[in-house]
Each structure stands twice: as structure tokens, then as C-alpha cells.
Image (cartoon, helix red, strand yellow):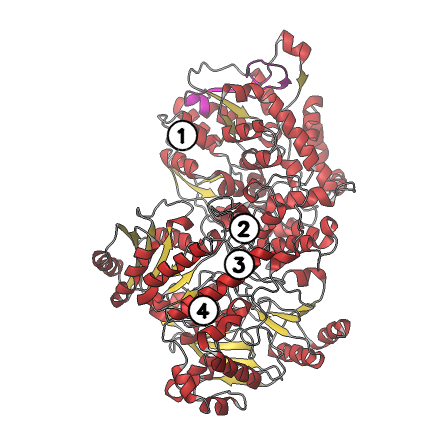
Amino acid sequence: MTDHSGLEAELRRAVRGEVGFGVTARALVTMDASNYRRVPLGVVAPRDADDVAAVLEACRARGVPVVARGGGTSIAGQATGTGVVLDFTRHMNDLLELDPGTRTAVVQPGLVLDRLQEAAAPHGLRFGPDPATHSRCTFGGMIGNNSCGSHSVAWGTTADSVRELSVVTARGRRLRLGRDWAGAPEGLRELVEGELARLRTGFPDLPRRISGYALDALLPEKGADVARSFCGSEGTLGILTEAAVRLVEEPRARALAVLAYGDESAAAEAAAGLLPYRPLTVEGMAADLVRSPAGLPEGGAWLFVETGGDSAAEARARAQDIVRAADVVDALVVTDPADRRALWRIREDASGTATRMPDDGGTSPSGRRRGPAGEAWPGWEDCAVPPARLGAYLRDFRALLAAHDLRGTPYGHFGDGCIHVRIDFDLLTEAGVGRFRHFSGELADLVVEHGGSLSGEHGDGQARAELLPRMYGAEMVALFERAKSVWDPDDLLNPGMLVRPAPLDTNLRFSVLPHRPVDVAFGYPADGGDFRAAVRRCVGVAKCRTAAATGPAVMCPSYRATGEEEHSTRGRAHLLYEMLAGDPVTDGWRSTEVRDALDLCLSCKGCRSDCPVGVDMATYKAEFLHHHYAGRRRPAAHHSMGRLPEWLRWVARTRTAPLLNALAAVGPLARVGKRLGGIAPERDIPRLAPQTFSRWWRGRRPAQATGGLVVLWPDTFTEHFSPSVGRAAVRVLEAAGLRVALPPTLLSHGGAIGDGTSKSAISLLTARRGRVCCGLTYVSTGQLDRARAVLRRTLDLMEPVLRAGAPVVVLEPSCAAALRTDLPELLYDDPRAARLSSAVLTFAEALGRYAPDWNPPAVDRPVAGQTHCHQHAVLGDTPDRRLREAAGLTGELRGGCCGLAGNFGFEEGHFEVSRACAEEQLLPVVREAPEGTAILADGFSCRTQLEQLAGVRGRHLAEVLAEALDMRTGGAG
């Protein structure tokens, strides 16, 4: 039996990098983006080639396999293993050299592609291949899989861009691979020279042939290129430690022609005919994969054809030439960089979008059980055929799907004949797995019949390696095995991949999940009420592992702050998955490993919109905390901040806000209070307003508005901390001609909406007093039983509003998001929850919908700030953009998260991460804002973060507009 403790101890002595044999380290790498799962013994993050050699030596002595891992986005299972996993992303992630003169770069295996692109861009250069995962895939993974990307019609595969590779073999030899047999291990040349005829005739001729070993690159007429032959070997021949790669000239300008066709077969037929125009891309996708067709020309499928030139006019002219040459239903040519990026995001997100079918799964017309909740999976993700045969292949592929009663929507690199598709295999039952296996064999035969490759981009791994004899024949596969033995005679490196593979229907990750649904609090309507399906949503695409937020994106701020996998959305999802699996996470809902990983989740909900498959980690976190602390002592912050509405209502009733403000200003008392409340000592306690918004409302003179009625929600933050926001909103809404009311405060039978107090002789005698609350603080701290009670009381109070069908205007984005999503998902059994959810509007939505002809005052100032993360993720900001534009507020708000995120930034131990999140976008943009800029921050958290970290007062959009109204009229209305 292997002495695992001895191996760990030896690695800790021999390796300078981190060695992790604990539960969290192992659980984070059990899966990649494939259908497969393996639990490793441990994880090592080497610092250099010496560390790599030390790991190989220790593992070889004990017969423990070694698997190299980059971004963990492999789709065929090759980034998982049962031995020691090498994580190159932590330390060996540098750009070592960039030489613009020779157009070369020297990179380490853990370097993310986008980091090289950013460094090369000022020199007018780039690395040619660019997979859709360019923001998180690493060079080690790209070389291991011979990755391609959308620009391969212009710049080829990764192998086409490799000059030299430094590798360490399983037996510790350090080789420098290149042309003319440079670095070839002993015996490789003899093997090749004895099989020249087979190597010259045994490989299909097509641009995307990735399957198998590239032994034909060792032919003398191809330069005997050992480095090129190493590409696509999936970590089975040696461990890459450094790579010298070629760069290409970046076009000075680009244009994107989006060509619309009736269906994907028509688009496929047209793709090959566009290649003579030398486009940079010819990408295809069908309407099934598009969440919203906004911005796309009308059609059922599209080709994304990019052109380059020395000027925008030249690039556009080339794109228009292609449009004229193409037989299209409709077309669009775009040169603006922001518009091009928006269109490309539609294509890049397809790999995640394709994992969910448009319906809820269930059964097919023939009665076959589909994957739950419309799930679809990889496994036949990237077959490739000659481009001229793509249309015919797609028709046959569709017929094969129909014959097996399966569904899938093809998309991908049509110009290279490479098709991506997720198929709704049922991988949860024995019958479904059998169908998966049978279909795989028939599809492999179909690909070979069309002269294709089983893999055109992502490698064979375990998903396709078993079927390689159908493509190459038994003798060529035997040659692959001999080549593997030359490089790795001990079969130490990633065994079971490419040669001597495990069967394609073993090690499936779904088999370890519980067979029965898990008892949970939320309804998970998008997952058929099944928490297992919710956790399965994460398919490892790893869009959450980006180093910087781009555009309006939010996900995942804590990962960008720490750089640790366990603080990414994917990492947390994998830990929850392993919690359900029961190994290596063995404590279920009581797991401290899952708790610690979720601790730095800001509950920003960014993943709900930015994750291509809609993982909602904020909800999963609340669910976990609910179970984790059931019947146990909760952290102090859960009481002090989770029950904040209760404490503040008590303060309002006793009118002790001035006293509490005075006490909080006394240093020693504030320190004691923060310690008792679990509040970060670095934080100032926000001042309470001396007069609540509701008290102001009761004392005001009612306006004589005659327009439509809107109910203004007095959220906890507006009510007790920022009543000026509520007052401003009333001023603007009434100026727009709307009648404003507050929700009832008495639970009664019948009655009208009233003025926020609902007082009458009968109601005072028969009703109980209460206040509406969205339940946000209870949800975010996982006090879900209390949240349910609060929300049911709220629904009781809102009965008159719901009967009247009045819109409910919520000023605080996080509260609006809670009512829009958490309420119906938590009270899924109460039809009133859905009705209130659908009634909720943001301030800008209400004005746009119920006062469409109102002209806001002309503010005519630039703006700076950040779109609230919940607004981005749940509510959308299009109405806000329109309102700002109408008021002359120019400029864009940034994405990301302010880092305070409700209670998160106030909790002890979170201050540094909270500040790091703010420093990513919010604070720099505010510091750089010119004088006179309106600093917009609709969320109380965002305003508090600005005040405490930058000394800047942010304002709600309602406040800015109300101030302009007062200036226009010469005083308050």
C-alpha cells in the first residue's frame, strides 16, 4: 500500500512551493470542464523546474501518477487524476521574455493567455490562437491540448506557434525540444524512422486534427520538430516548464461581419466558400444558443467573420466584400471595438449557454428520460471534418441525434470544420450512460466516414481516447503506445489518457451524487427544485477566474482579490459538489472547508448573470449557512447585522439614534461594540439618521399629484441611514406626476393602500402593526427560517397593494434584487411572492414605465461610479442609462463590486478583501474623476465604501435629479 503520509512529508521537504494534501486542496481539482471526476492524493504548486523534478522523483519512487493542470478548463478529463496534481497557475505563471524584434515570447506554463496578449499589444503583436477561455486558460494547457480558438483560420493552432519547449521527463531528464530532433528522448528517432510509411499515410489531412500524438511532425520533410510533436500530448509525455512561442502582427483595425442564415446547415455550407477572402475568423452558431438576439441581424444562425486591415475603412471594406459574396438572409458589419466585444461575448458564452436546453428536460416525445432541468454535457464537444464537408456532416450528425432521441445545438469554428456541441445525455442512470456509450461509438464512425478527427481542439483525454482505433486503426494506436513508452516508460504521467485509456463511461462525475433530492430551503425553480442540479450547473468553464473585471462584469470579486481557486465561483461550486459526494468533503453541511471557502463570497450575485450557466453562489451560500448553523451558535455578525432591521426598528421606536451616534463616536466604546458585534475594527459605524424616512413622510404635506399610483418601499437603509434618498425620490416621482404612497404598516383584513400608516378606527382595533422588509440581511447570513417569517409578514402587509396591482418602487438595488429573486425562490409555495416580485421596479424603471413623457431636469454633468452589483446581476441598468442620458448625465459607470456588499465588508476578517475589491475599479475611477463630476452610487453599501475609504460622498440618482429640480424651480417642491 502506498505511504501517502510519507509522500506528503517528502514533498514538503523537497519542494519550495506549496504542498496541499488537505480536503480543500484535493476537492478543488477533482474535476475539470469535462464529465469526469478523480480524487487526487494531493496538489503541489511548484515554484520552478527544480520543484517539478523533485515531485517527479518522489512520485516515481512510490508509483504515484502525476498530472499537470493549468486553468482546469479541459473538456475531455485530462486535467484530473488520482495521484499528485501540479498546479502551475500559482507560481510558474510569468512572462519571462518578450522580443518584439523577433516576434517571440518566453512563457511559463501557468501564464494566462490574456496576460501575454496585454504585454504584446503595445508592440502591435499578439499570440495567434485564442480559445474562448482566453481570460483564464494557460499556456501549459494550450500546449497540452494543442488549443486553437476562433482565429485559427488565420493563425493556426498552438503547435503552429511553438518554437521551443523546455520539459522534464518522468525520469527527471530536462530536455529542450525543437526542430531537427532537438531534445528527442533516446529511442524516439529510431521509432519514427522505422515507421515512416505509416506516419506519411496514417493521418487525415485537415486543419483541426488534434486527436492522437502528432508523430507525423517528426517526419524529415516536416523538420523533425519534436516541440511540435509534443503539442497535444495532454501531459502524458513530459512536464512543460517553459515555452518559446511565436507572435503574429496584430491588425491595426478590425471589422466584424455577422452573416445571418436560415439555419446552421446553411451557415456551414457557406463557411468554406469564405476562406479565399482570408478572414481572421469564420465562427458559427445557431439561435438556440443566444439568450437575447439583440444586436444580431435577423436569422436562425450566424457566421461571425472578422477581417483586418491597416485602417478601419480597409477592414470594413474587406468585411463588406465578404457580405456581398455571401448568400445571406441579413448581415451586419461592425467596426466599433465596444460593439465588436459585445457581439463576441455572445459567441464566447456559448460553451456555457449550451449546457442548458431551452426547456426543463423531463422526457422526450418518445418517452426517453432527458437530463434533468434541460442539462446538456460535453463528450463530443469538438469533432472536426474537412471544412468543405461540414454541411453534409452536420446533416448526418443531426440525423444521428434524432435516431438516438438526443438533442444538441452545434456551434464553433465553421471555417475549420470544427463543431462544438453539448448533448442532453442522461448521465445519471445506467440506461442513460449506456446510450451515451452507444452513441459515442456511432458518432466516432460518422466522423471518420467524413474524413475527420475525433478531436478538433480540446484533445482526447478519457472522453475519446478509447475510440482512437476507429480513427487511426489498431496499428497506429499501438505506435502511439510505443511512443508513450519511449517518453514515459513507467507510465507515470497522466495515465489513462490518450493511450491505454480508461473506458469513456467510467469515472463519470455524476455517479457520486446522492440518488435522492437534498432537503433544502430555497425552491431552485430553474433546477427543478433540485439542489443537486443547481450544484451541477458549474461545468468548469471558469469565467469566474479572470484576473480583472471587464466592461460591466462583476464576477468574481473575491477571486480577483485573492487569486485563490477556493474563492472563485467554480471553486466554491466544486466544494459544494464534493460535499454532496461525501468524499473528500466528509462533513456534509457541517463542513468547515465549505464554510471557509464561502466566507469570502460577497453574495454580490455577479455569477448569477456573468456565469454562462447561471451559477448563483449567493443563494448557495445562504442555503449552506442555513444548514451549517442549524441548532448551533452563530457568529456575532449574524446577530448584529443579520438582524439589523429589528435593532433599527427598536432604535426608531425609542428615538435613541442621537444617543447611539454619540456613543459610537467614543473610541473605546466603539471598539467594544464592534468586538461584541463581530464588526471589523477598521470600520466606522455608520451614523443613524436623526429622523427616519417614514417619520418625515408622516409629517409632510401631501402633494396634489393626479397621475398613476406608485408605492415607495421604505427599505431599511433608506429608512434609517439615508432618508435623504427617500425624500429625493418622492420629490422626483411627484414632479413626474405620479402619486406616491408607502406600504401599509398594519396587518388587517381588507383596507386600502393608504398613506403608509393605514390608520382607521376599525383597523386600529383589529390589526397588528408591522413594517415591510425584503429579508435581505436574514438571507445573506443564512437565517432562512427567520427570513421566511419576515417575508410572509411582508406579504400580509402588502395584500392591499397586490390587490390594487400597484407598482412597488424600491430605491436600494440589493433590496429590489432580494424581492425580485430571493422572495419567490424562498417562498415558492406562496403565490403572493411571485406577484410582489413582478411588481417590483427600480426608480428608473418606474419613471420610464409610468411617466414616459416626463422630461427630467438638465443636469449636464459627467458621472462616475459603479453600477450596483445586484443591479447588474438581477435588475438590469438599461432604464438607468436612458434616464441619465435624458438628464444630460454623460459617461459610463464601471462594473465590478464595491467590496462592502452589505454585511460582508463590515464583518471581522473581511476588511482587506473588501478594500481590494474597491480598489479594483470603484476607487480609482472616483479619484480620477474631474471636478464637477456627479459620483453616482445607488446602493447604501457603495456610498458607505466611498465615504469610508475615499472620503467621497456618493449620491443616489434620485438625489442628483431632485437637486436639479430644486435649482430649476428655486426651491423644494
The amino acid on which the numbered mark 3 sits, given as a three-letter code, is Arg
Instruction: Answer whether labels 3 and 4 touch (C-beta < 8 Å).
Output: no
Q: Quadrant of the C terminus?
A: top left
Q: Earlier in the sequence, mark 2 or mark 4?
A: 2
Magenta: predominant secondary structure element? Answer: loop
**Residue at numbered disc 3:** 435
Q: Magenta stretch?
A: 733-757
Q: Tell me the amino acid under the disc marked 4.
A: Leu
What numbered label is drawn on residue 371? 2
Mark 2: few/some/many CA within 10 Å (<14, 14-19, 20+): many
Where, by quadrant of the figure, is residue 418 drawn? bottom left
Numbered circle sitting on residue 848: 1
Say whether marks 1 and 3 touch (CB < 8 Å).
Answer: no
Between circles 1 and 2, the one closer to the viewer is 2
Residue 393 visible, this orientation: yes
- Relative height, residue 225 to residue 460 (above, below): below
Residue 704 drawn in magenta: no
Farthest front residue in view: 366
Q: Which of marks 2 and 3 is in front?
A: 3
Mark 1 or 4, closer to the camera: 4
Residue 606: percent from left, percent from top: 53, 47
Mark identifier at residue 454? 4
Residue at 36% from the left image edge and 76% from the top image edge? 205
Report the number of discs.
Answer: 4
Q: Distance between the residues labelled 2 and 3?
A: 12 Å
Q: What element carries label 4?
A: loop
For the residues labelled 1 and 2, the Cα–Cα distance comes to 41 Å
Identify the mark nearer the N-term, 1 or 2: 2
Q: Is residue 564 visible?
A: no
The percent position of residue 600, horizontal first and vertical second, equals: 64, 50
